[in-house]
Amino acid sequence: AQACNLFVAGHVLPTDELVNIAQKLQPGEAYQSEGKIIFYKGSLEMFQQQQFSRIIELKEPLFCIEMLYDIFLKNDAAIEQDFRRITTGRESAPLSPTNTVIGETTYPDGLPKIFIEEGASVECCFLNLNEGPIYIGKEAELMEGCCIRAPFAACQHAVTKMGCKIYGATTLGPYCKVGGELSNVVMIGYSNKAHDGFLGNAVIGEWCNLGAGTTASNLKNDYAEIKLWHYPSHRFLRTGLQFCGLIMGDHSKAGINCMFNTATVIGVGVNIYGAGFPRNFVASFSEGGTSGFNDVALSKFFATAEKMMHRRNIELTEVDKEIFESIYHQAENFK
């Protein structure tokens, strides 16, 4: 018998209502929205052949990531939803009296707007709750002198260095370490921007490192509409945005004092170094700077990735390598 799996569109952010709908699906049934399949329960073969016993139109509004910049644009709403989902009915660890809190500490419905998980450390920080909640994950640390404006989430083992300035909506994924100034930034996980420098309206993937002094522009000098690299169409597209910073793929690095132009897109496994501004799209598995780029061999990339991941006791698996090999071959179309 063929396996009966649940297929979920990867760009849809789940809500309690959508989870309930998906759990009630019967084999062969699918839900769609605006002509796109959102959920399907059945075999891979039937899904690939689009053979559904029943297609139901989804009436609930969807919270989706359609473009790269949606990740930071919609982060405020995402933090709000996740905060309520994670903290409702639970009790926060106490907040140290060394901190200064600005704004109402609870929502009108009584839900606290600060939640601190067990083992987290928050000392001598300024926490502004006027625009949303603040979530501090297990074993995370906010060092002395940090100024945090909500909405903000620091996930498990994340660290903000002393005197760090963070404007919402910002999310630090697991084991991320940040310093300097951040505004509306999403760091997926295991990435570092541990020193001074500015990052705004940005998305940083996993296992990235931004050297000391690295700064990325998020606003053009002439206030013009921002164009951003669009992979499917192989060109830059208008965004309708005035603010957009650095978009960096997994396992990419920037040396000390690197500078990035507004709306720069960096692929996977890229190593940027040297003076000046690199071009505002750098294909995956490249290394260099303003003087040009060279290819990064997969063997070299794997060696570096394994060293970095080993520091967190995480293995670079064969499945990981197959994924990166696929990206490596796709990147040839952009060089």
Image (cartoon, rainbow, N blue to C red):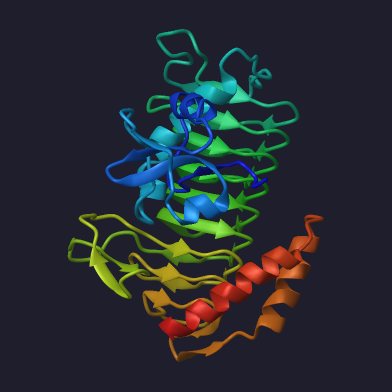
Does residue 257 appear in the picture of this structure?
yes
Is 142 in front, or is 269? 269
The residue depicted at 78 percent of the width and 56 percent of the height is 314
Indicate whether 289 appears above or below 35. below
Indicate whether 20 appears above or below 247. above
Is 196 in front, or is 138? 138
Q: In the image, residue 34 lies at what x, y percent? A: 27, 43
Residue 37's image quarter? top left
The residue depicted at 63 percent of the width and 15 percent of the height is 90
Is the C terminus in the top left, top right, bottom left or bottom right quadrant? bottom left
Does residue 273 appear in the picture of this structure?
no
Q: In the image, residue 64 lies at what x, y percent? A: 38, 43
The residue depicted at 43 percent of the width and 83 percent of the height is 333
Q: In the image, residue 208 lies at what x, y percent? A: 60, 63
Is the N terminus in the top left, top right, bottom left or bottom right quadrant? top right
Is 306 in front, or is 18? 18
- Left or right placement of residue 300 versus residue 246 in this view: right
Is 54 in front, or is 208? 54
- Left or right placement of residue 266 versus residue 172 in this view: left
Indicate whether 277 appears above or below 223. below
